Image (cartoon, coloured by chain):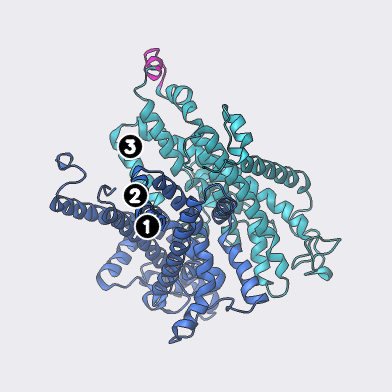
Chain colours: A blue, B cyan
Amino acid sequence: MEAVAGPGGGVLVRRRRTLTTVVRRLAEGTALVAALSFGLFWLLARMPGDPLDALLATDPGLTTTDIAQLRKAQGLDDPIPVRYGRWLRRLVVERDPGFSRVHKRPVLEVLQGRTTSTLKLMAGALGLSLALAIPIGALSAIRRHTVFDHGITLMTFAGLSIPAFWLGLVAIITFALWLPLFPAGGSPTPGAGLLEQLRFLALPMLVLAFETTGGWTRYVRASATEALGSDYVRTARAKGLPESTVVLRHGLANALVPLATVVALSGPGLFSGAVVTETVFAWPGMGRLLYDSVLGTDHAVALTSFLTLATLTILFNLLADLAHSWLDPRAQLP
Amino acid sequence: MRPRPPFWEGERSRPIGRFLGHLPAAIGASILGVTLLVCLVAGGEPPGLQGQNLEMRFLAPSFGHPLGTDELGRDVVGRILQGGRVSLVVGLVGALAGTLLGIAVGATAALGGSLLDSLLMRLTDAFLALPLLPLLIVLSAVDPAARLDRFLTAHGLVTAGPVGDSSLANILLLVALFGWMHTARVVRATCLSLAGTEFVLAARVLGASAFRVVTRHILPNATAPILVAMTLGVGRVILYESALSFLGLGIQPPVASWGNMLAGAQEALWRAPWLAISPGAMILLTVLAVNFVGDGLQEACDPGGRPG
């Protein structure tokens, strides 16, 4: 009986419940990824023009009979569920998601380093976004209904309304074309120093952070407003604590807890934004790879990179939920 | 010594008055109205490749061409108006379709028994947890509208329709397919909370069917949140459409859309940077206006909803 233990519960009860929830969420996530993988495999397999048609078009020495034989030998004539089963078995048993038609290399080799690149970009954007949203939101809450506050509200709306790719173009025009401070795109040469890496990361990071910063600022503002109007803040003031302690230790600290949920909800959006940002800035991450492979009909790579992105998103959501329940012991894991 | 709230946040009793008194919403509504009107009225002619003049490529903004000319020598103002038509139609129709789907899913979940309910709500959670744009990118590559059309034709559900350029249908299909979740939650919550009320009971006692109870008695009570979700949906759909078109997976040239105009501008970024400004500014302005209207609606319908 979970209800008897109550939301506070004992430490052990809580820990066990958290564990059960994590296991359940992981199982759900796995099921979702599996369903997605089958759905996409099926859709991609039914696309007109399989790899061998492309081969036929490029190699005049091949006849249709050769192709038919090759197709049979590679099992491309089998029903889609059979082919999916074979693909899945190779993925699970041999950790081999297939062969890239365009790159002429195993998909795993093509993927190498891409996930790290995307995570680097996302971590940078996330950090920047938090570093901007928390102080700006708090200041906005303290100075409610001033010009500063209205300006910030307008900015947050702009953050939610601006197309990320256009912001990227504007950033390139401003900071690469007019003021040549940063490179317009691309990635640092391997082994470059931290500063050089940051130079390449700066613009994509800024663009990716802009969207989330808007929403988060609004949220910090709302919850800080609520906290600052609460009884415990009045008590803290009445005790004669300095205003900075009241605002930072009593008001803001409590206002920040629910931010974890909002950060969690931004996960899918961040990964979506990463795709656009990486494409505009030619950042060699997962999103760019997905886009290139979809355009180049490189189905094995498209499937794998999409599933990687989906898995990362689901894990991100779970982690953020865990962070929330750790920060706020009253919260129930969903 | 609380600062005086700005005049647009003053007390007003009726929702309409509150909406009109909400300055950003009023501004947003007028911007939206003007954009819609101008694009629909003036954006009629000449579509696509007409009006190109290769001797006038990449002209800087001037009196004759206030926003310059593009890579085929077409006037950018004219292209913006045509593109606006596409973007606005996709935004409105796509959000409407998503809302209808959401109402259907939400009502089915609330009324269809606990098994169906938990199944549909899990599905909603799953859809919300997905990285939308990557999914849209993969799906738009498989040409879903043409497939659906073939499927329906093959099963005799529709007579063979012309499958020409299906990019518009693709976009609409995809944004509707992934734009129903918020509405579904709102509708489900309203249905569940009103299911036990006396007026619903009265309607059922009088012999009203489940469909009638939902459409005539429950949904009118959810009009406000549905309207807000749909308005915000319009902005979201416009952003997704423009992103997909920018990536070359949405509206295909020569038909103009703000997104694919930016794709063309990106290729000429070093030569004609001004081309990359106006279409994006139009997207920003429109989506901003939509979001202001949504915010105003929300506040008008639920004045206590926003703290501060």
Q: Along the horizontal axis of the image, is B4 left or right of B54? A: left
The secondary structure that dominates the magenta segment is helix
Residue A149 percent coordinates (x, y): 55, 51
Contact between labelled residues 3 and 1, with CB atoms less than 8 Å apart: no
Residue A296 appears anywhere in the view: no
Q: Is residue A234 above or below residue B64?
A: above
Instruction: Please state the extent of the stretch shown in magenta in the rendering.
Output: B199-209
Contact between labelled residues 1 and 2, with CB atoms less than 8 Å apart: yes
A72 or A40, nearer to the observer: A40
Residue B166 percent coordinates (x, y): 60, 52
Chain at numbered mark 3: B
Residue B203 on the magenta segment: yes
User: Could you tell me the amino acid type at mark 2?
Assistant: Ala
Looking at the image, the residue that sits furthest to the front is A240
Query: In front: mark 1 or mark 3?
Result: 1
Tell me the CA gap for discs 3 and 2.
46 Å
Q: Which secondary structure lies at badge 3? A: helix
User: Could you tell me the amino acid type at mark 3?
Assistant: Asp
Determine which residue is flagged by label 1.
A245
Determine which residue is flagged by label 2.
A236
Query: In front: mark 3 or mark 2?
Result: 2
Q: Residues within 10 Å of mark 2 (few under 14, many from 20)?
A: some
Q: Along the horizontal axis of the image, is B15 left or right of A285? A: right
Label count reads: 3
Looking at the image, the residue that sits furthest to the top is B206
Discs 1 and 3 lie in a common subunit: no
Determine which residue is flagged by label 3.
B117
